[in-house]
Amino acid sequence: MLLSQLTLADGSRAVAVREDGPAHLVPGVSTTRDLALAAIAAGHDLAAEIAARGQGDEVDLEAAYAEGRMLVPLDHPVAAHLHLTGTGLTHLGSASTRDAMHTKVTEEMTDSMKMFRMGLEGGKPAAGSVGVQPEWFYKGNGLAAVAPGAALTSPNFALDGGEEPEVAGLYVIAPDGQPVRVGFALGNEFSDHVTERGNYLWLAHSKLRPASFGPEMLVGDLPDSVEGTSRILRGGETLWEKPFLSGEANMSHTIANLEHHHFKYAPFRDPGDVHVHFFGTATLSFADGISAEPGDVFEIECPQFGLALRNPLARNSDASAPVAVASL
């Protein structure tokens, strides 16, 4: 089952669901968050909640996408209550790309490789046990969540703007503080790899960028192996293309372990909040010497997740003076 959010032709918001056939609107609800909270209150899953509401009108998602009416599949009406976060060095093969950026002129193992090795050795604990914690980073709040089809904009101080094709977990915090996974979506965890390469301690700076996810959300368990394609289009032609892998068969951590090490922090269990957590990747165009330019289009697709995620690259070129802090 795939869920999505869109704006209808009359400007109102809606939730759409599709399985094997065309998409249909979910009656009586305008946001995925409201639908999820209703399911939690009723004590059943999303499929049961959707079934209880019956089938609404058919909707053309491709047309909505082309017209710029697709939204991220889960959001929050107050931007500060949506948290964009992620984990790195979680995928088999991810260490080689990161290590190449962070290699020191030394015989010692880099910190990136040490972190990756820790995941290999302790990232998949037995059920009920806690494994090693992964690298973790913060990307921003709902203001940084970019709709499918909209531009991913690099700030004027950025040194690079590159894609990261990933799977993201989408969550709502229940009224009792219990994190509840609503589904999974394709994500572009857009980052500044030149800044990160300058010094690995600048990773936090490199991740404070917008990100996009969707257009559709997969409800249910994540397939053990996710196989998709990441590409960059320039002038309508493919500039770069490469397969990417995700799912636990291709990861050094379990999803449950990554979720535990995010939600173990009490501020991330505030009732009603929404979380979008990116699980990492091992595939970057930057690693192949590609430098994306404004106007290029990032495209991430995987049939299991429905429509492909597409976002053009833009750059905020407005000159700006240093940010001055006022004193009261």
Image (cartoon, grey):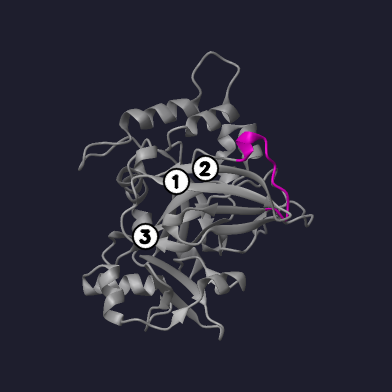
**What label sits on residue 227 in the rendered view?**
1
Q: Position of residue 41 (x, y in %)?
A: 25, 73
| Nearest to the observer: residue 171 or residue 143 | 171
**Mark 3 crowdedness (10 Å alpha carbons): few <14, some 14-19, many ≥20:** many
Determine whether, in the image, residue 262 is placed left or right of residue 142.
Answer: left
Q: Helix or strand or loop: what does disc 2 sit on?
A: strand
Query: Mark 1 near mark 2, Cβ–Cβ under 8 Å?
Result: yes
- Residue labelled with disc 3: 183
Q: Helix or strand or loop: what does disc 3 sit on?
A: strand
At label 2, the amino acid type is: Pro
Q: Magenta region: which residues? A: 285-296
Residue 175 magenta-drawn? no
Residue at 37% x, 44% y is: 225
Residue at 46% x, 67% y is: 75
**What label sits on residue 130 in the rendered view?**
none
Residue 292 magenta-drawn? yes
